Image (spheres, rainbow, N blue to C red):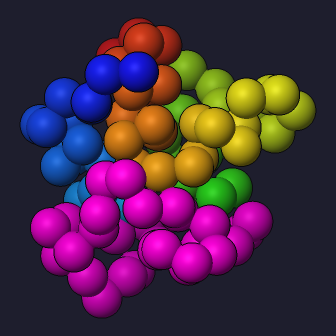
Amino acid sequence: MSAADPALRQELAELIISALNLELRPADIDPAAPLFGEGLGLDSIDILEIAMVVSKRYGFPLRSDDEHNTLIFSSLDHLAQHIAAHRTL
């Protein structure tokens, strides 16, 4: 899988920080680090919040029953790649 678009990755990092009220800068989020547990340290409630803001911002649903969620939310890079492939806005 190729690296995500840097501009989209930056925008997504800003969106995550804003949505979750994190005290981080976008550059503090390692694009390849896990979003869950170690890495960014998010939990399932945080992921639901991200799914809602991503759906609103980019115009497509991130469904809780998607079999690819583990991969989609595995890192900022993977989430950005998924958004680039599916966005309608």
Residue drawn at the location 48% of the way across and 74% of the way down: 39
Q: Please, is residue 41 above or below residue 87 in the view?
A: below
| Residue 40 shows in this picture | yes
Bounds of the magenta span?
Answer: 17-46
Left/right of residue 35 with respect to residue 33 in the rendered view? right
* Image vertical order of residue 1 relative to residue 32, above or below: above
Vertical position of residue 14 compared to residue 17: above or below: above
Q: Where is residue 26 in the image (x, y as percent from the top left)?
A: 19, 66
Instruction: Say whether residue 21 is magenta.
Output: yes
The residue at 26%/82% (across/down) is 24
Task: Tell me the quarter of the picture where residue 44 sits.
Answer: bottom right
Is residue 45 positioned above or below 57 on the image? below
Measured as percent of width and height from the top left, residue 82 is found at 48, 25
Overall secondary structure of the magenta stretch?
A: loop
Q: In which quarter of the image is the N terminus?
A: top left
The outermost residue toward the right is 65
Specify the quadrant that holds the C terminus: top left
Residue found at x 42% / y 62%: 33
Judged from this view, the residue extending furthest toward the front is 1
